[in-house]
Amino acid sequence: MNQAPRAVCVIGFPVAHSRSPLIHGHWLEKHGIAGVYRREAVKPEELNDFIAGFAGRGYVGGNITLPHKEAMMKLTEPDDRARAIGACNTIWFDNGRLRSTNTDAEGFLGSLDQSAPGWDRNVSNAVVIGAGGAARAVVYGFLERGAERVHLVNRTLSRAEAFRERFGPRVWPTRWDDLQKVMKGANLVANTSSLGMTGNPELPIDLKEVRDDAVVADAVYVPLVTGLLTAARQRGLRTSDGLGMLLHQAGRGFELWFGVRPKVTAELRKLIEDELLRK
């Protein structure tokens, strides 16, 4: 008797825009695994009931996207990484227990590792722009890789100060008006805000005073090449884009659900690039 395909989903509201089914569908086909990956649009007020019946719906795990990343922490058993970041994006059953983790940090780091090998050999002065969930994951990852100082720049200083309280003295809360000042001598710049995303203003930043060996990363992937990345490349700097983060953050979940660690290949990247360009 054939075993039923293992079912996984992405839970969010809205969720129709998610590219996760395309990414995981590609890996399922490549590895010959009998599995399905669906979208589940779940309103915040429906989340508790949906998760209570999660196993009954046939699911072995899933991805969590906005607006549920923090709420899901209370409905699962988060690991150390999810607790440190304060949000989860991946859930799975472990001997009947619904556990959770956050793979955004490793996604961002994995993209940097692939795009700019050796970027973490001497991160003495990093600048992170934005203070949302993506920023928490990025700051956590940078500190994990040994960053000596991370300037956290945000329009609301109190939100930046909360990062220092969460992550410690290597985080330097920085006023928005001081953004250009902390660019001087920076060897790592990461935008985690929505600035530069299609429909939003560009990030008002000048890269002329960053170090010549600096690496510039952007969590935005629509458009594929943001104004920040264009400026960095014109300056001759190495870059890492948001699509890389999206692809690399997906691998850990696939491994937890299906027992295989997939690779982020040029073929997969082109598949998602083509989908983005069609939109």
Image (spheres, rainbow, N blue to C red):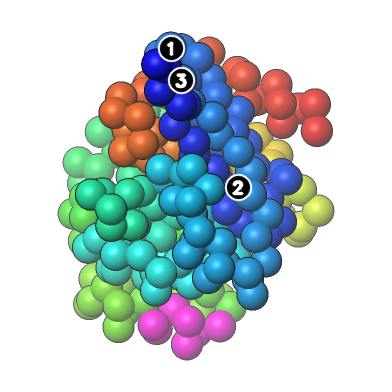
Q: Which residue is mark 3?
A: 34
Q: Earlier in the sequence, mark 1 or mark 2?
A: 1
The boundaries of the magenta stretch are: 156-162
* Three-letter code, disc 3: Ala
Give the image location of residue 60, x and y in percent: 41, 43
Left of 178 or right of it: where is 228?
A: right
* Three-letter code, disc 1: Gly
Give the image location of residue 74, x and y in percent: 39, 74
Can residue 184 be seen by looking at this rendering? no
Tag on residue 220?
Answer: 2
* Structural distance between the alpha carbons of marks 2 and 3: 32 Å
Q: Residue at x 76, y 57 (%)?
A: 200
Give the image location of residue 196, x and y in percent: 68, 52
Tag on residue 32?
Answer: 1
Left of 120 or right of it: where is 228?
A: right
Query: Tag 2's secondary structure?
Result: loop
Quadrant that contains the C terminus: top right
User: Eyeballing the image, is 214 above or below 127?
Assistant: above
Q: Residues within 10 Å of mark 2 (few under 14, many from 20)?
A: many
157 drawn magenta: yes
